[in-house]
Image (tube, grey):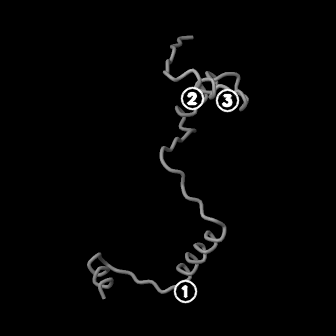
Amino acid sequence: MNTTILQIPVTKSFRDQVSEVVIEMGFSSLQDYLRLVMKKTLTKEIDVTVGPKPIMLSAKNAKRYEKIVDDYLSGKSKTKSFDNVDEMMDDLMK
C-alpha cells in the first residue's frame, strides 16, 4: 500500500480535545475520523459551509410567513408587478 503522512500543525491541547470527542463519537482514533472525513469529501458526501448559521424562525413566525406565502399564491394579497425597474421606481415615488 502506497501511503503518505499528512502533517497538520495544531496545538497539543487542541489535538487532545478533538481526539477525546471523536473517540466519544465511536471512532478508534483521530486518524480514523480524519480518513473518513477526507474520503467523504472526495465522494462529495460531505459539504462544509463556512459562515453564519441560517436563521431559524420560531414556530409562530414560520406559521405567519406560511400564511403570507399562501395568501400570495391564492391571490388574496394585493400585489403589483412591473415590467422593468423604472416602472417600479415610478410607482414607489408616488
Which residue has dot 2 on it?
Answer: 39
The extreme top residue here reads 1
Distance Cα–Cα, label 3 vs label 1: 53 Å
Quadrant placement of the N terminus: top right
Mark identifier at residue 22: 3
Q: In the depicted view, which residue is nearer to us: 12 or 30?
A: 12
Mark 3 crowdedness (10 Å alpha carbons): few <14, some 14-19, many ≥20:
some
**Is 63 placed above or below 1 here?**
below
- Left or right of 27 in this view: 43: left
Residue 53 vs residue 81: left or right?
right
Asked whether the beta carbons under mark 3 and mark 1 sit within 8 Å of each other, the answer is no
Looking at the rendered structure, the kind of residue marked 3 is Val
Please say if 90 is above or below 52: below
Residue 88 image-quadrant placement: bottom left
The alpha-carbon separation of the residues under discs 1 and 2 comes to: 51 Å
List the single residue furthest toward the left: 86
Q: Quadrant of the C terminus?
A: bottom left
Q: Residue placed at 63% from the left, 65% from the top? A: 58
> How far across and down, in percent of the image, does residue 70 sit?
58, 77
Q: Position of residue 30 (x, y in %)?
A: 63, 23
Q: Amino acid at mark 1?
A: Lys
- What label does residue 76 carry, if any? 1
